């Protein structure tokens, strides 16, 4: 058995009477990105696109890069990560610890990172993981995350917990479009709520900007189909950080900044809508990747 055989089946933790969070920090590298990263590589291995000794490359704000770096180390690939320079030092050091080669681009320039990744992959014949446009990103959450949540709430049994809303921050949009829409197929009343940084409200029609909620708000909609989103909520970096700190102090949950934004947005939605059932969100990663920016 490989460590990557133990991705998923993370607990659904009760935050309050109407709010539950899928604790993705219990994945092997401590983030939800282990799911799509492994799904993308598994597919490439099965169809013969990847073999031991090959090079993989990805542009990332951090967590997906860490997942790919870990999987590359496990499976014998060379891994190259392109990342904006304003990402946390902890993320950079983790990538290097797994043996990945890090290329930094100017702060906030995600388009530059993606363009450089595409050019290097094309010129060198490297495998482009392409998380921001890869349908396997969505499919990984449809096949794993959504099914686990349905099982967590006893869906299909004589009694199950009604889910009124699915709330999550959007980086690539894979979780929102994969898990969210799959849940909606089974429980049509679910509202799909996207969360983005107040400082970079791209989905809300604003301009991209620098912010501190690493992992979401990367400057584009990417995989998100806005026609299938019921509501977009914004959370400031400062509010997200403060809520993440409170999760540690009040619940013993040492989580990242995006988890703070998810929880805060979900709480605001509950306060506004007073649902009869529950709201599902995510604790996307651990807090130890953010000491330098809290």
Image (tube, rainbow, N blue to C red):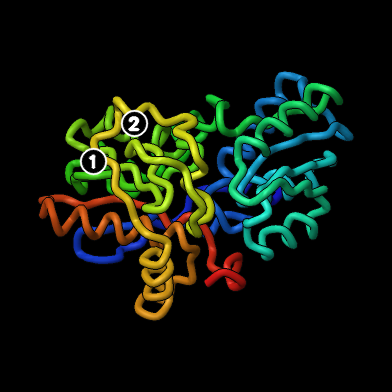
Left/right placement of residue 271 relative to residue 47 reads left
**Location of residue 100 in the rendering, given as x and y in whole percent from the top left corner:** 80, 49
**Location of residue 286 in the rendering, given as x and y in whole percent from the top left corner:** 54, 64
* Quarter assignment of residue 250: bottom left
Report if residue 1 is visible in the image: no
Q: What residue is disc 2 on?
A: 181
* Quarter assignment of residue 137: top right
Q: Residue at x 68, y 33 (%)?
A: 41
Left/right placement of residue 106 relative to residue 293 reads right
Q: Secondary structure at mark 2?
A: helix
Residue neighbourhood size for the residue with mark 1, other residues' Cα within 10 Å, grouped as few (<14), some (14–19), many (≥20): few
**Location of residue 278 in the rendering, given as x and y in whole percent from the top left corner:** 21, 52
Q: Residue at x 57, y 38 (%)?
A: 36
Q: Nearer the viewer, residue 36 or 193?
A: 193
The image's mark for residue 255 is none
Q: Residue at x 52, y 43 (%)?
A: 218
In the displayed structure, 106 sits above or below 227; it is below
Q: Residue at x 53, y 24 (%)?
A: 135
Q: What residue is disc 1 on?
A: 157
Which one is earlier in the sequence, the residue at label 1 or at label 2?
A: 1
Q: Secondary structure at mark 1?
A: loop
In the displayed structure, 196 sits above or below 240; it is above
């Amino acid at each position: 058995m490989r460590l990557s055989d133990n991705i998923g089946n993370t607990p659904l933790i009760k935050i309050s009477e109407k709010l539950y969070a899928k604790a993705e920090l219990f994945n092997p590298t401590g983030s939800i990105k282990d799911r799509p990263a492994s799904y993308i590589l598994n597919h490439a291995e099965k169809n013969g696109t990847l073999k031991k000794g090959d090079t993989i490359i990805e542009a990332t704000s951090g967590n997906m890069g860490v997942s790919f770096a870990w999987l590359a180390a496990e499976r014998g690939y060379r891994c190259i990560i392109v990342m904006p320079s304003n990402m946390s030092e902890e993320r950079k050091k983790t990538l290097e610890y797994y043996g990945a080669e890090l290329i930094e681009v100017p702060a906030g320039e995600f388009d530059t990172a993606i363009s450089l990744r595409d050019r290097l992959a094309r010129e060198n014949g490297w495998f482009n993981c392409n998380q921001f446009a890869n349908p396997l990103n969505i499919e990984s959450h449809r096949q794993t995350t959504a099914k686990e949540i349905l099982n967590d709430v006893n869906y299909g049994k004589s009694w199950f917990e009604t889910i009124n809303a699915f709330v999550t921050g959007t980086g690539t949009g894979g979780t929102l479009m994969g898990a969210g829409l799959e849940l909606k197929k089974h429980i049509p009343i679910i509202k799909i709520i996207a969360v983005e940084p107040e400082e970079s409200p791209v989905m809300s029609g604003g301009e991209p900007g620098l912010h501190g909620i690493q992992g979401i708000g990367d400057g584009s909609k990417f995989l998100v189909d806005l026609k299938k989103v019921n509501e977009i909520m914004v959370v400031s970096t400062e509010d997200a950080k403060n809520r993440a700190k409170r999760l540690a102090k009040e619940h013993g949950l040492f989580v990242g900044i995006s988890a703070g934004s998810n929880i805060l947005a979900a709480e605001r939605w509950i306060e506004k809508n007073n649902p009869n059932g529950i709201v599902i969100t995510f604790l996307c990663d651990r807090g130890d990747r953010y000491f330098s920016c809290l």
